[in-house]
Image (cartoon, helix red, strand yellow):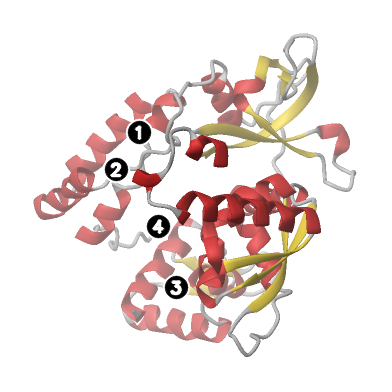
Amino acid sequence: MRAARLIRMALLIQSNPGLTAAALARELDISERTVIRDAQALQEAGIPVRSERGRVGGYFLAAGYRTRLTTLHPSEAETLFLFGLPSALQDLGLSDAAETARLKLTATLLPSVRQAAESSVRRFHLDAPAWFREAATPELLPELARAVWADRTVHLSYARAGRADARASAVARVVEPYGLVLKAGTWYVVVRVPGEREEHDGGWRTYRVDRITALDPAPGAEEPFVRDPSFDLAAHWEARSAAFARTLLRTTVTIRLTGRGLRRLPAVVDGAAVVDALASVSAPDPAGLVTLDLPTESEEVAFDQLARLGADVEVLAPACLRARFRERAAALAALYRADPQEREPGEAEAQR
């Protein structure tokens, strides 16, 4: 473990001269004291690592020195060849470039490592789109991707959801496109509105790419925009996704669960709802049942989701939802009371 960490540390310093002990500690998930000890170990191994104090200080390699630690281990090559998403690269117009890069990388590998890399491609494939939907590439996605790569401010028109006339409902904005996200087969772009940076949300917006109806260079924006160096696309998306999911949870139902029902709850309701519900869970009663308040989109959604738990859940409130489960239980009891061969024609339909 330490040997791998030392190699990674040397490569980090080589690719990012001036990294501080604190920055290296974050990257390597170790303490700053361990960074100092590892730097000494690298020096003893003949790698000329030096540290400089001051405002522009940090860790550096001697001028002109390059490590020879870049040979890939077979497991590293296997992982590297799994990074690509063929469908996503095709959507972005990068499939040819990705294939060329793969061939170049393959040509540089030792035969044994090359075999391991090619083996991973045969064994693993990531299919991003969801089931039962036709994957369609948004027409403007390649052009938008080029704007993201070039940090180019653009003027876009966006059709709001649920509007029959896309042109009449389009919203036009000048935005700085920061990143693209592929979620369950749907592309989204995270942008920042320059004139709204001081707002409470920092001017950040997320748009579905397939609802962008027009895209042009922003007038007067010949130079690339200056990216916020603190922006982390993955962290931003995770935070905004969780916040969006919670805005949908407008209703609360009180339920009583068996131990099995509690274990199965995450499989039938939204993850954000589970997190909030578990914060209110009671201690088990003598029968082993627990009570909790479950956030949900609506009583209709709660009915469909909780019905999957069968007798492992009991709805306590609201009363109208409890009555609906009582009616469903009575209908099921009547349906299964008699042998199907003994039921009169049309009786099953009447009970439903």
Q: Identity of the amino acid at label 3?
A: Val
Secondary structure type for disc 1: helix
Look at the numbered discs 3 and 4 and tell me whether their residues touch, using CB distance below 8 Å.
Answer: no
What residue would you read off at disc 4? 64
- Residue 80 lies, with reference to residue 73, above or below; the image says above
Mark 2: few, some, or many residues within 10 Å (few <14, many ≥20)?
few
Residue name at image x 18 percent, y 43 percent: 122
Image quarter of residue 43: bottom left
Secondary structure type for disc 3: strand
What residue would you read off at disc 1? 86
Q: Which mark identifies residue 125?
A: 2
Q: Which mark identifies residue 126?
A: none
Of the two numbered discs 3 and 2 on the same chain, state the one appearing first in sequence: 3
Of the two numbered discs 2 and 1 on the same chain, state the one appearing first in sequence: 1
Of the two numbered discs 1 and 3 on the same chain, state the one appearing first in sequence: 3
Of the two numbered discs 3 and 4 on the same chain, state the one appearing first in sequence: 3
Residue name at image x 78 percent, y 53 percent: 320
Find residue 63 and report its horizontal and vertical position in percent.
44, 60
What residue would you read off at disc 3? 49
Secondary structure type for disc 2: loop
Look at the numbered discs 2 and 1 and tell me whether their residues touch, using CB distance below 8 Å.
Answer: yes
Find residue 143 and report its horizontal and vertical position in percent.
56, 19
Residue name at image x 56 percent, y 75 percent: 258
